[in-house]
Amino acid sequence: MEEAIADMVLAELGIENLEPASESVLRGIPELDGVEARSLVQSCLPHLSKVPESAGIDSKSSFDVSVSPVACLWGGMGAVYELHVKFPGQQSFSIMAKIVDFYKGGDTPGDERRRASYVCEAAFYTQGHAERLLANGCTVPIPLHVELCENRWLRICMTRLSGRRTIMNLEATLGVVSWLSRSHATFWGVRADEAVQSGLQAQGCFWHLDCQAQEHAKMPWDGWQGRLRLAARGIDRRLKSDKMQTICHGDAKLDNILFAEKQQDGKTDIPSLCDFQYCGKAPPTKDLAYMLT
């Protein structure tokens, strides 16, 4: 009943991108070559010990793999695929593959930011940040294989998150706030600077003034928007100089959150977060403000 009500509310709100991609969208996703799919799985096999679902699998055995397209990437720079892997006599499991083509897209500042965001996500998975969050109780995809060819392409293979999408009710909100608080504590203070040096965004979150100069220039001069336009640079400087700095997720919205089974108290949903393209240094309030809007 609760899920049915949630679906009705989402439909009323016009939130359609929480549903599986339509057939027309899926038809627009390039087919992943079977040889490349097998090669990606082969590269993941040495790291299967990280995945509980793969316990008992002999990674040296032969396997079958089938591919399902999932979504187009932001800016048209590639796609996400689900690789269904089956070993003889074993239950099948899935690997999510994000395939990025840096040649796609244009040469605008926005396109360059998108390319940089994918490189940031590669650093998140290769520099141990996913493992740090997992160790502190924040569920994120487990990295299995990352391959980056600078200025050309990127391959990120990771475990598939389980759960459902829902509306951000009180229980869901409390779960995400708990996730964010654990994440922020993991990278508090000087650890945020160390994470930036490893490749995360020097300024976390997409919605900051340096990233939205064109939108700022188009704001009207009158009314509350005009007052906000005049105050924007001061607010931006205040946020950058705030003493309370950490690593923010940067894009904590419903599209990037799944909710699994409830905790033992039966009250709070357990969230899992993905998409770490704008993961970087910022005050923790930026994550909270964006999540609550």
Image (tube, rainbow, N blue to C red):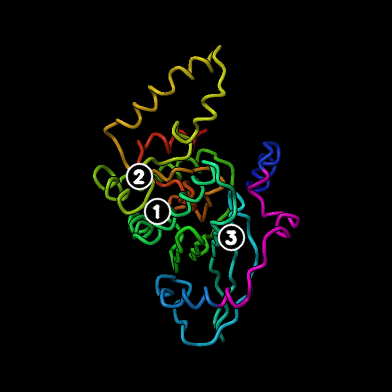
Q: Please, which residue is most extreme toward the left here?
A: 190
Distance CA(mark 3)–CA(mark 2): 25 Å
Left or right side of 82 for 185 = left
Given the image, on which type of amino acid does mark 3 rest?
Answer: Val
In the image, taking residue 262 as reference, residue 236 lies left or right, namely left
Tell me the SS state at disc 2: strand
Q: Label 1 vs label 2: CA separation?
A: 14 Å
Please give the name of the residue rendered at 52% of the width and 73% of the height, measured from the top-left corner: 40
Could you tell me if residue 271 is visible in this image? no
Q: What's the amino acid at mark 1? A: Cys
**Quick one: 13 or 241, which is closer to the camera?**
241
Residue in the picture at 54% in, 87% down: 62
Judged by depth in the image, the label closer to the viewer, 1 or 3, is: 3
SS category of the residue bearing label 1: loop
- The image position of residue 248, as x and y in percent, is 39, 43
N-terminal-most mark, 1 or 3: 3
Q: Position of residue 67 (x, y in %)?
A: 63, 70
Residue corresponding to mark 1: 138
* Residue 200 image position (x, y, % from top left): 37, 50
Image quadrant in which you'd find residue 91: bottom right
Residue topped by disc 2: 247
Where are the magenta residues, as a range?
16-38
Please state which of residues 13 and 235 is positioned toward the viewer in this rendering. Answer: 235
Task: Give the residue at x 30% y 38%.
Answer: 245
Within the image, what quadrant is residue 188 found in? top left
Residue 50, position as x, y percentages in the image? 40, 70
Is label 1 in contact with label 3 (beta carbons under 8 Å)? no
Q: Report, in whole angstroms, how far the alpha carbon at label 1 lies from the one at label 3.
A: 23 Å
In the rendered image, residue 65 lying in the magenta stretch gets the answer: no
Which residue matches tag 3? 80
Q: Residue furthest right?
A: 24
Residue type, label 2: Ile
